[in-house]
Amino acid sequence: MTESNSRIEILDVTLRDGEQTNGVSFSWQQKLNITKHLLKDLKTDRVEIASARVSPGEFEAVKKIVEWAKSEGLQNRIEILGFVDFDKTVEWMKGTGVRVLNLLTKGSLNHLTNQLRKTPAEHFADIQKTVEYASKSGITVNVYMEDWSNGYTHSRDYVLEYLSVVSKFPVSRFYLADTLGVLSPFEVRTAITDLVKEFPELWFEFHGHNDYDLAVANCLEAVSAGVRGLHVAVNGLGERAGNSPLEAVVTALHDKTKFRTSIVEREITNSSRLVEVFSGKRISDNRPIVGEDVFTQTAGVHADGDKKGNLYANPILPERFGRARVYALGKLAGKASITENLKQLGMVLSPEIEKKVLERVIELGDQNKTVTKEDLPYIISDITGENLEASFRIESCTVTSGLGVKPKAEVKVNYQGKHYEAKGEGDGGYDAFMNALGKILKELGIQIPKLSDYEVRIPPGGNTNALVETVITWKKDGDSSPIRTIGIDSDQQVAAVKATERLLHILLGNV
């Protein structure tokens, strides 16, 4: 296999076919930004950005994108979908400056007779008129064979006649569309092998859909059978179950075949995040290649195996896509999971402290709490600051607050082996807690400094159930040296209670 015929061109259809995803509509600014990224950073060969004659807004979007592409020498890599309408699509294109037309034609006899209600000869004549008009206008034409998959399966003679006739027109590429996502890998290989044998001089590309979740496998079979290009969408956007997903198709192609593309793998994650934000369609955490969790090891034994020789790594290495392996922290975590996460944070702990951290992580996991790498410094701070032998411990605290509810708190403490309880109200949950605690401290003759600052920190990327760090600064009258205490918990109120308890440990010498 030579380098020329092992090279597969990638046409990204995110901005055209992907926009047919329910609820997705890109602004022209978003389309321009995505186009720039796809062509300049991801190095996609070509980008299909719109359908012709859809709306005035689409006209302006295409015009602006083409203006940018011309300034970068990329004009011929911008494509639009158009229609068999003689001169209407072509004249629309002239106004935008776009120079490549992907003409939507009928690839099945069923669609032709029941939707267009025309004969093959009539359709071919219409295609010829449109293609020749476009060609005379300096526009390159490719043709989509819409519903080709059903066409080949149920009307092969029509498909062969179509290709025999239309290939005589000035057409550059033939797009074999599995429009309804009905083919299996075996059927893709059989059909394309047949067509390549019958028409070896034609440039075929495969346009797949994912209705059976077979789009990636179908793309691999298509290139093996002889197509020279694949159509994909970032995050698999598209109608119904979506188009062939760029991220998985390219990765599988590079790893499982001898074929290569121009795609820069390290930019795939960036492409996914950009389209995710602009489309408003969140991808699942376990989506191959780009999902949040796909490079996460949860079981401690896996972390241990990786530490001893990458025993649980596969060829889809996160570094290829600008990411890093993550070792999840929870009830299944082991010592190796803690060690690997600390290493990524640049931290080394004593075996005793590391053991305590692991115990706390497992404890939080049992409580169904989400623990991330960014939580570890907070947990460490909490562990190294706690004193289980302290003379003053807050044993329980219940805070009630909400809209239309007067905040109330009930506190139980243990001081020097004796139990004390109090209730309080306040302007907020923490204020109610402090008022209740204040009653106990007054009874015990303990005076605490005034609160001068109260700060809540949430770890980067933390979820709503992530750990929270509450930092409280206390100042005594006339004392220039403040006391800062930290409390860690997934509940903000409890974190503040722990920070307050830490203050009492310091005041009473239990540190």
Image: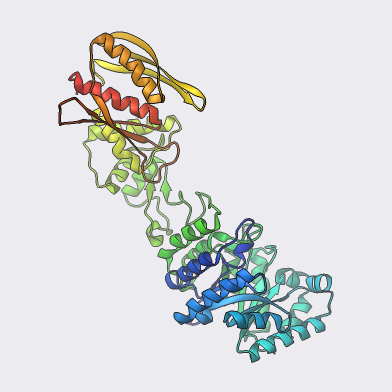
At 58% across and 79% down in the image, what residue appears?
96
Q: In which quarter of the image is residue 206?
A: bottom right
Q: In this view, does 333 lie above or below 234?
A: above
**Depicted 414 relative to depicted 507: above or below:** above
Residue at 41% across, 41% down: 299
Position of residue 214 measured from the top left corner of the image (x, y, whole percent): 62, 60
Nearer to us in this view, 42 or 196: 42
Outermost residue toward the front? Answer: 478
Please tell me how many numbered marks the rendered image carries: 0
User: Which residue is more in the foreground, 263 or 474?
Assistant: 474
Say which residue appears at 39% left-offset and 20% top-offset.
432
Question: Residue 420 location, x and y as percent?
Answer: 33, 9
Q: Can residue 253 be seen in this view?
A: no
Residue toward you, 198 or 40: 40
Which quadrant of the figure has residue 85?
bottom right
Asked if 404 appears above or below 118 in the picture, the reply is above
